[in-house]
Image: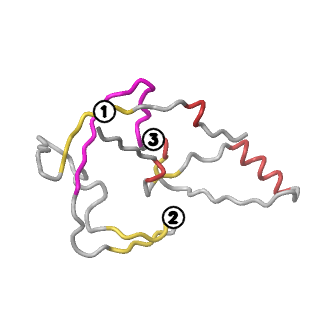
Amino acid sequence: MNKIERNSQDCFFTVPDPEPSEILYKKLLKALDGSDKFSYAERVYGFPERLLLPKGKKEGMPFQIFVYINPVEGELIPSMSRIFGGYKFDNKAYGFPLDRPVFNFRYKGPNMMLKDIIIYHKDEEVELNLTY
């Protein structure tokens, strides 16, 4: 049996949920009265972490996962972004090979697999990190 654990923070394009406005407001008040320094280090753009992977259920929720493994061909292209920083990418489109509409898709290739999986959601009470 294989157990694959993924965290939405592993993805390059994800951002955490924004700080709630009441906490941001309290930080601003502290900065205005001089008791604390104000800084805002969050990335503004990106896909929300909480929406990247399905939540599942405690008892498990069935899904299908498509896995495609492709060798990196050619030279990696350096990319610089004011938002994400510097990274290197191959010459494939984002989301390749599913970057185009799929009709009568055959997933029987040697480097691809469609698999039934079950996603379990762990107890929120224990893992949820709340800031007040």
Mark 3 vs mark 1, foreground winner is: 1
Residue at the top extreme, as displayed: 59
- The percent position of residue 27, horizontal first and vertical second, equals 77, 51
- The percent position of residue 74, horizontal first and vertical second, equals 22, 74
Query: Can you identify the residue that label 1 sits on?
Result: 63
Circles 2 and 3: CB distance less than 8 Å?
no
State the image quarter where residue 65 is shown. Answer: top left
Q: Is residue 44 above or below residue 76?
A: above
Nearest to N terminus: mark 3 or mark 1: 3
Mark 2 vs mark 3, foreground winner is: 3
Query: Can you identify the residue that label 2 sits on?
Result: 83
Query: Can you identify the residue that label 3 sits on?
Result: 51
Distance in Å between CA atoms under marks 2 and 3: 20 Å
The amino acid at mark 2 is Ile
Distance in Å between CA atoms under marks 3 and 1: 15 Å
Q: Is residue 112 left or right of residue 128?
A: left
Which stretch appears magenta?
Answer: 53-69
Mark 1 vs mark 2, foreground winner is: 1
Distance in Å between CA atoms under marks 1 and 2: 33 Å
Secondary-structure class at tag 2: loop
The amino acid at mark 1 is Phe
